[in-house]
Image: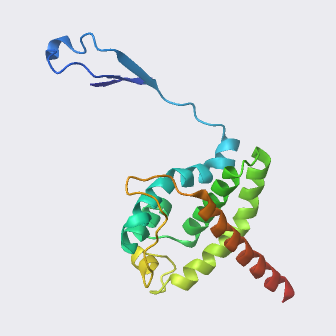
Amino acid sequence: MLRGDAGALDTAEPSNKVRDDRLPGDAPVTRWHRCAVPPPNLAILHGEGLAMLGGLEALEAACAHGPMQACAEAAIRAGDVSGDGLLSVAEVARMVRGFAWVVAASQEGTAGSLGLVGGAGALGGLAAARVLVESLDYDGDGRLSARELAQDRASLSTGGDPAGRPLALERVADAVGILRALVEGLMASGSAD
């Protein structure tokens, strides 16, 4: 049973033998209050990372045992902020910054180091996103579809289970290390010109 008002939501699980006019009966009522909104400075520093952390379980569940198309669709759902079913360069960059935050947080990063990851990830994430979109955008519209992401890709096996066991963060750390090397290489070649 649910009962809401402006300040909270009440829930109870009465016996199925209690008459409607006597609800909730003697069942205990739990009152749920909305969490306080985080201060803007914390939301700016950690919002993308927390959003990506929330999406990792769904990505693992879709990518661990399903076909590549299901994995690609899960990636689109995790990153599609605009709701158009496609990933733009900005949305891919947001995902890269979020993954970088997750890796830094998993390595017991401090608030300061997480902030640095966010700042450094802004440029690196954008560069990596542009390279990724340009290399996978087969129809040339500047955005990635699930079909483009799954094109010519083999299924991934992460060792998770279909119920959605959390992603092994060591694999994410390895991927971010490769991405970091790529970005550093791009920046080094750009400064040599």
Number of on-image labels: 0
* Residue 89: image location, x then y, percent: 57, 72
Quadrant in the picture for residue 151: bottom left
> Compared with residue 129, is residue 58 higher up or lower down, i.e. above or below?
above
Drawn side of residue 122 relative to residue 23, left or right: right
Residue sitting farthest toward the front: 159
| Residue at the image position 35 percent from the left and 17 percent from the top | 29
Figure coloring: rainbow
Closest to the observer, 166 or 54: 166
Quadrant in the picture for residue 119: bottom right
> Compared with residue 191, is residue 168 higher up or lower down, i.e. above or below?
above
* Residue 191: image location, x then y, percent: 84, 83
Drawn side of residue 25 relative to residue 17, left or right: right
Residue sitting farthest toward the right: 192
* Residue 164: image location, x then y, percent: 42, 53
* Residue 171: image location, x then y, percent: 60, 64
| Residue at the image position 68 percent from the left and 50 percent from the top | 105
Q: Quadrant of the N terminus?
A: top left
Q: Quadrant of the C terminus?
A: bottom right
> Compared with residue 141, is residue 172 higher up or lower down, i.e. above or below?
above
Asked if residue 84 can be seen in this view, the reply is no
Closest to the observer, 171 or 73: 171
| Residue at the image position 49 percent from the left and 29 percent from the top | 34
Asked if residue 139 can be seen in this view, the reply is yes
Drawn side of residue 138 relative to residue 121, left or right: left
